[in-house]
Image (cartoon, rainbow, N blue to C red):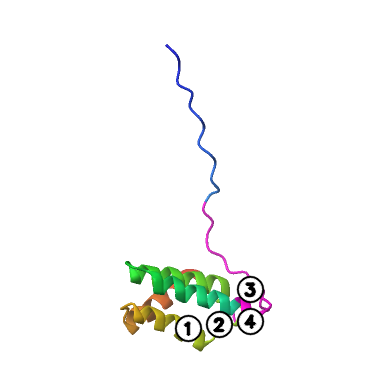
Amino acid sequence: MRALAVKPAPLRPAPQGLTVPAPAGGGECRHRTPAYLERGIAMAEQRITEAREAIHTTAYRTFLAVLSTHGRCGCLTEAHIARLFRAAQAKGESPRHCTDSWTNARTRLGL
């Protein structure tokens, strides 16, 4: 009887914790151009808008992604946040749930 050949599973990198590289507020923006931030906000709005289910979870994860990239350099404005909240509210999230998700994401990242 022949032994079955078993291929070893490919190694996957271990999940890394979320980190934010620049100091809070007023730090140098590593993004260098407003276009990078604008593209990121547009992508975040699109992610929320295209969600078909689990809107609350999608909004939270999107807020987490935006804050992890843009939350400490000081380039994220109230207008950017309002755009994200409007996208989530258009999908049925309440203003309170948006605020809670945003606050939870900030807390998770230590902002």
Do we see residue 41 in this rendering? yes
Q: For numbered disc 1, what is the local secondary structure? A: helix
Say which label, 4 or 1, has the lower sequence index. 4
* Part of the protein shown in magenta: 15-36
At label 3, counting other C-alpha atoms closer than 10 Å, the crowd grade (few under 14, some 14-19, many 20 or more) is some
Question: Label 1: which residue?
Answer: 81
Q: Amino acid at mark 2?
A: Leu
Q: For numbered disc 3, what is the local secondary structure? A: loop
Q: For numbered disc 2, what is the local secondary structure? A: loop
Q: Identify which residue is drawn at 66% across, 78% down.
A: 29
Q: For numbered disc 4, what is the local secondary structure? A: helix
Do we see residue 111 in this rendering? no
Say which label, 1 or 3, has the lower sequence index. 3
Mark drawn on residue 34: 4
User: What distance separates the C-alpha of mark 1 from that of mark 3?
Assistant: 19 Å
In the rendered image, residue 54, in percent from the top left (x then y), is placed at: 32, 67
Q: State if disc 1 and disc 2 touch (CB < 8 Å).
A: yes
Mark drawn on residue 76: 2
Query: On screen, 4 above or below 48?
Result: above
Q: State if disc 3 and disc 1 touch (CB < 8 Å).
A: no
At label 1, counting other C-alpha atoms closer than 10 Å, the crowd grade (few under 14, some 14-19, many 20 or more) is some
Q: Amino acid at mark 3?
A: Ala
Q: Amino acid at mark 4?
A: Pro
User: What distance separates the C-alpha of mark 2 from that of mark 3?
Assistant: 13 Å
Say which label, 4 or 2, has the lower sequence index. 4
In the rendered image, residue 16, in percent from the top left (x then y), is placed at: 54, 56
At label 4, counting other C-alpha atoms closer than 10 Å, the crowd grade (few under 14, some 14-19, many 20 or more) is few
**Given this view, does label 3 or label 4 mark the residue nearer the observer?**
4
